[in-house]
């Protein structure tokens, strides 16, 4: 797990089992494109 993503999620929702996938941002894509990518996953 990447601590930058996992630790805050675990602190906010300690009992939850939330599936998560960390992605790197693509610097030449706009926010809308990243949102669509996340939605597709």
Image: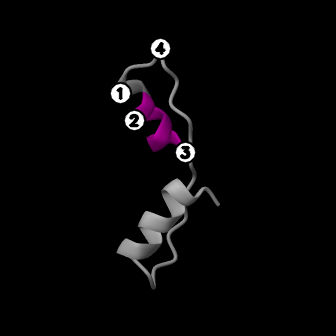
Q: CA distance from mark 4 to mark 3?
A: 20 Å
The answer to whether marks 3 and 2 mark residues whose Cβ atoms lie closer than 8 Å is no
Foreground: disc 4 or disc 3? 4
Q: Residue tagged by mark 2?
A: 35
Q: CA distance from mark 1 to mark 3?
A: 16 Å
> Where is residue 38 drawn, in percent x and y?
47, 41
Callout 3: 10 Å neighbours few (<14), some, many (20+)?
Answer: few
Q: Residue tagged by mark 4?
A: 28
Q: Residue tagged by mark 3?
A: 41
Indicate the quadrant where residue 30 lies: top left
Q: Quadrant of the N terminus?
A: bottom right
The answer to whether marks 4 and 3 mark residues whose Cβ atoms lie closer than 8 Å is no
The answer to whether marks 4 and 1 mark residues whose Cβ atoms lie closer than 8 Å is no
Foreground: disc 2 or disc 4? 4
Callout 2: 10 Å neighbours few (<14), some, many (20+)?
Answer: few
Going from N to C along the chain, the mark reached first, 3 or 2, is 2
Callout 1: SS? helix
Q: Residue at x 41, y 74 (%)?
A: 11
Q: Magenta part of the protein: which range?
A: 34-41
The answer to whether marks 2 and 4 mark residues whose Cβ atoms lie closer than 8 Å is no
Residue 18: say if magenta: no
Q: CA distance from mark 2 to mark 4?
A: 14 Å
Going from N to C along the chain, the mark reached first, 1 or 3, is 1
Q: Residue at x 50, y 56 (%)?
A: 5
């Amino acid at each position: 797990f990447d601590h930058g993503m996992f630790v805050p999620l675990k602190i906010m929702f300690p009992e939850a089992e939330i599936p998560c996938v960390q992605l790197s941002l693509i610097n030449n894509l706009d926010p809308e494109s990243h949102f669509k990518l996340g939605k597709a996953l």
